[in-house]
Image (tube, coloured by chain):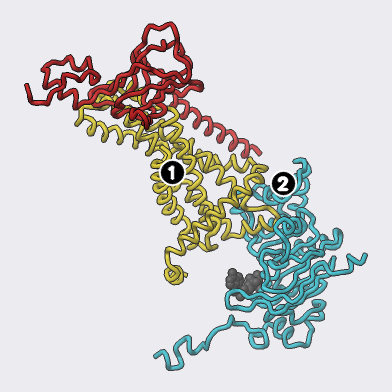
Chain colours: A yellow, B cyan, C red
């Protein structure tokens, strides 16, 4: 298995995976109307995929905001521009770090569990059992998780950003002594709702779709063995990270 | 009336290879309506694969599989699903949905395909669970069940819709003598009261004898013997003698095809 | 059943939390003036030189933001810059003889368009053009002039009247 994998070459393998994942995306879209019939399942998945990721997202958001404030404060103080601390913390968070770090954390926290769960359902014939009961596993298992990921990601990114601002304020104002009014005033004067806040939301929506697509695809096509599931989980993290960062560049370059 | 005379399942010229191995080689098989038919054969001959062909989970390389008047390999997805709503399938490894408890597992097909009042769902599910002796386990999760209990839950799920055809892949594995008796009785009752056709893959000749109308012996990609269980057990052919006698040597190979044993172990001098 | 309901409640709370976070970000980290609030009208202005003026740069009167720059284009025939300003409908009482000036916020800050109100009874309408404009202040010119005059009044009368411009170093 491994030997053949190497012989076939990574490039053709990667291309085949991308093609198959793309087709799978349309299969999921086709199954979405059917999956809305059991919308409860989607609701349940939003809980598992989204709400259960809150703790890690909030903790990391707080620390990222604190580190940002610390780093940027020292850089800005070289130019005597610490008044802009609020602005640069907010813009770094909203435009880049919020969506990207949330997506990476999401891939590690929720993406892996989606892959492992679907992979184990494959390995234990649960997907086959659904097919035998005339239930489409793509509509019942895959689409709700996909929708949940797409819905949860922007929510998590907003929470991440809010906690990041809080962390930045904590370090910048409480600790480093930037004036509270300056911090907020400078931020509110330069941050725009549509260009910055909402654009970040669009970004995280795209990341949510991509990361969850990779996770469900890896789980759905995993070889039905424990080794296969382990491998698929790893690939979810690796592929998600690469694709999120690459897509971030493309989106930033062309849309902003 | 002519319709009910024709077999519910009719397999013609079924040929399938998996990898390099020939699983079926022009297999023919008829399952009459309202019968209980057992398919027996050595491990790895393709009994599970045969059931998968009948339910369209796998497509053969060649041949026809007619189930209730439609040729399964040619069916589109929707037609196949429509057919499957009338087929119950007991997986060899139970395949319960680990997200749901026992009750919801059995209720799953009902909830998916019928808009029934909760009261009715409850009654049907509890009746089926009672039939397999697990009504008290309704709120357990699959991970809290023993292998034999999981088997019986899977059985309850397979029959919850009172389908026209039920395929049991090794229903007797892991059952104690009491549960075995109950399950045998259940299969018989379903057959006699509701006229449900059953295909049964099993290794336990004694159990098969008590329930099956006919037995097909599958070996080397073909049905090598067929008949009533007692007739077959008494049978004179080399196949039946070897299989029911449990002998390692005969036309049915006990070993998966392999190279020379002594050579593999390095005893023929070449490896030294 | 109750298990299912608690998921639904939890998920509902989670989604509410998301909206609360979004509302917080939208209102607390941006100012209401930064809203691209529904209706706006556009006004044109020509400048000899827009300097570093960018798309979405603020448009202000008396330091208060009233809109933003929606496009900056070169007029091919006149070879000057045509700037389109999109101004919030709420600020519809701007005299049509007002002038547009490109200012810099702070010494190294971004540039914005400041509108200095005139005295005409007629108000600006959608599609009007501001005739009186003043180009961006060029730091190089400013430094040159400062060296020539040795006084700070150059900052009050920027690049527009550069007739007494002499080569630097002639002092
Ligand atoms: N995906 C596959 N690829 C290649 N060969 C396979 C595959 N699945 C099954 N086989 C082979 O097909 C043959 C038949 O398998 P099958 O599961 O139908 O056997 P079985 O008769 O049900 O055996 P048992 O009684 O042990 O359950 C086996 O020899 C197995 O090695
Ligand atoms: Mg089998």
Q: Chain of mark 1?
A: A
Residue sitting at 47 percent across and 29 percent down?
A: C22
Secondary structure under tag 2 reads: helix
Is A210 on the left-hand or right-hand side of A191?
right
Residue sitting at 44 percent across and 14 percent down?
A: C124
Q: Position of residue A161 (x, y in %)?
A: 40, 33
CB of mark 1 near ligand 1 (< 8 Å): no
Circle on res. A103 = 1
**Which quadrant: the C terminus of chain B?**
bottom left
In this rendering, is residue A8 above or below B87?
below
Q: Position of residue B60 (x, y in %)?
A: 68, 71
Q: Position of residue B68 (x, y in %)?
A: 81, 64
Q: Nearer the viewer, residue B101 or C135?
A: C135
Label 2: how many Cα within 10 Å (few below 14, some 14–19, many 20+): some
Q: Nearer the viewer, residue B115 or C70?
A: C70
Residue sitting at 79 percent across and 55 percent down?
A: B162
Is C160 on the left-hand or right-hand side of C115?
left
- The answer for how far apart the CA atoms under marks 2 and 1 are is 35 Å
Where's ligand 1: which quadrant? Answer: bottom right
Q: Nearer the viewer, residue A119 or B202?
A: A119
Is A172 on the left-hand or right-hand side of A217?
left
Q: Quadrant of residue A73?
A: top left
> Which residue extends farthest front?
C77
In this rendering, is residue C145 above or below B153?
above
């Amino acid at each position: 298995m491994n030997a053949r994998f190497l012989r076939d070459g990574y490039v053709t393998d990667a291309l085949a995976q991308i093609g198959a994942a793309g087709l799978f995306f349309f299969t999921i879209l086709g199954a979405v109307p059917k999956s809305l019939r059991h919308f409860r399942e989607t609701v349940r998945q939003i809980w598992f995929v989204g709400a259960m990721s809150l703790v890690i997202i909030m903790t990391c958001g707080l620390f990222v905001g604190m580190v940002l404030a610390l780093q940027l404060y020292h850089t800005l103080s070289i130019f005597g521009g610490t008044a802009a601390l609020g602005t640069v913390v907010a813009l770094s968070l909203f435009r880049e770090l919020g969506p990207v770090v949330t997506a990476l954390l999401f891939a590690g926290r929720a993406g892996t569990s989606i892959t492992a769960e679907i992979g184990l359902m494959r390995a234990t014939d649960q997907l086959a059992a659904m097919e035998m009961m005339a239930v489409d596993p793509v509509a019942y298992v895959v689409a709700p998780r996909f929708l949940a990921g797409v819905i949860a990601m922007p929510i998590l990114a907003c929470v991440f950003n809010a906690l990041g601002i809080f962390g930045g304020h904590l370090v910048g104002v409480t600790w480093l002594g930037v004036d509270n009014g300056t911090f907020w005033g400078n931020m509110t004067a330069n941050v725009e709702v549509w260009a910055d806040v909402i654009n970040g939301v669009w970004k995280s929506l795209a990341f949510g779709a991509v990361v969850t697509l990779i996770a469900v695809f890896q789980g759905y096509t995993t070889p039905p063995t424990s080794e296969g599931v382990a491998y698929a989980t790893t690939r979810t993290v690796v592929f998600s990270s690469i694709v999120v960062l690459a897509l971030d560049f493309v989106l930033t370059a062309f849309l902003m | 009336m002519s319709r009910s005379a024709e077999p519910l399942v009719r397999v013609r010229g079924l040929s399938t290879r998996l990898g390099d191995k020939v699983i079926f080689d022009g297999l023919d098989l008829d399952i009459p309506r309202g019968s209980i038919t057992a398919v027996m054969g050595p491990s790895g001959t393709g009994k599970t694969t045969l059931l998968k062909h009948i339910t369209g989970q796998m497509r053969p390389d060649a041949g026809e599989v007619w189930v209730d008047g439609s040729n399964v390999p040619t069916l589109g997805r929707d037609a196949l699903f429509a057919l499957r709503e009338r087929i119950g399938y007991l997986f060899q490894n139970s395949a319960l949905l680990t997200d749901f408890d026992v009750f919801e597992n059995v209720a799953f097909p009902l909830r998916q395909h019928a808009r029934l009042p909760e009261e009715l769902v409850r009654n049907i599910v509890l009746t089926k669970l009672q039939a397999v002796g697990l009504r008290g386990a309704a709120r357990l999760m699959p991970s809290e069940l023993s292998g034999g209990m999981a088997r019986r839950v899977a059985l309850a799920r397979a029959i919850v819709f009172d389908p026209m055809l039920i395929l049991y892949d090794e229903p007797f594995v892991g059952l104690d003598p009491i549960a075995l008796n109950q399950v045998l009785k259940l299969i018989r009752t379903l057959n006699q009261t509701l006229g449900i056709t059953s295909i049964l893959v099993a290794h336990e000749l004694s159990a098969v004898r008590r329930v099956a109308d006919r037995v097909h012996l599958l070996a080397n990609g073909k049905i090598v013997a067929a008949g009533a269980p007692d007739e077959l057990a008494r049978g004179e052919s080399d196949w039946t003698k070897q299989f029911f006698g449990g002998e390692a040597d005969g036309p049915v190979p006990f070993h998966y095809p392999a190279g020379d044993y002594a050579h593999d172990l390095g005893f023929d001098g070449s490896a030294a | 059943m109750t298990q299912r309901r608690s998921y639904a409640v939890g998920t509902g709370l989670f989604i509410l939390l998301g909206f609360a976070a979004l509302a917080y970000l939208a209102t607390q980290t941006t100012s209401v003036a930064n809203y691209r609030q529904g209706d706006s009208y556009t006004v044109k202005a020509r400048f000899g030189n827009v300097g570093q003026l960018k798309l979405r740069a603020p448009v202000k009167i008396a330091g208060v933001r009233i809109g933003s720059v929606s496009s900056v284009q070169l007029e091919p025939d006149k070879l000057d810059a045509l700037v389109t300003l999109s101004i919030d409908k709420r600020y519809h009482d701007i005299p049509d003889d007002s002038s547009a000036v490109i200012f810099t916020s702070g010494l190294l800050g971004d540039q914005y368009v400041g509108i200095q109100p005139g005295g005409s009874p007629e108000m600006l309408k959608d599609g009007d053009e501001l005739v009186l404009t003043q180009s961006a202040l060029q730091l190089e010119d400013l430094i040159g002039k400062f060296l020539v005059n040795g006084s700070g009044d150059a900052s009050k009368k920027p690049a527009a009247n550069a007739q007494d411009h002499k080569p630097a170093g002639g002092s």
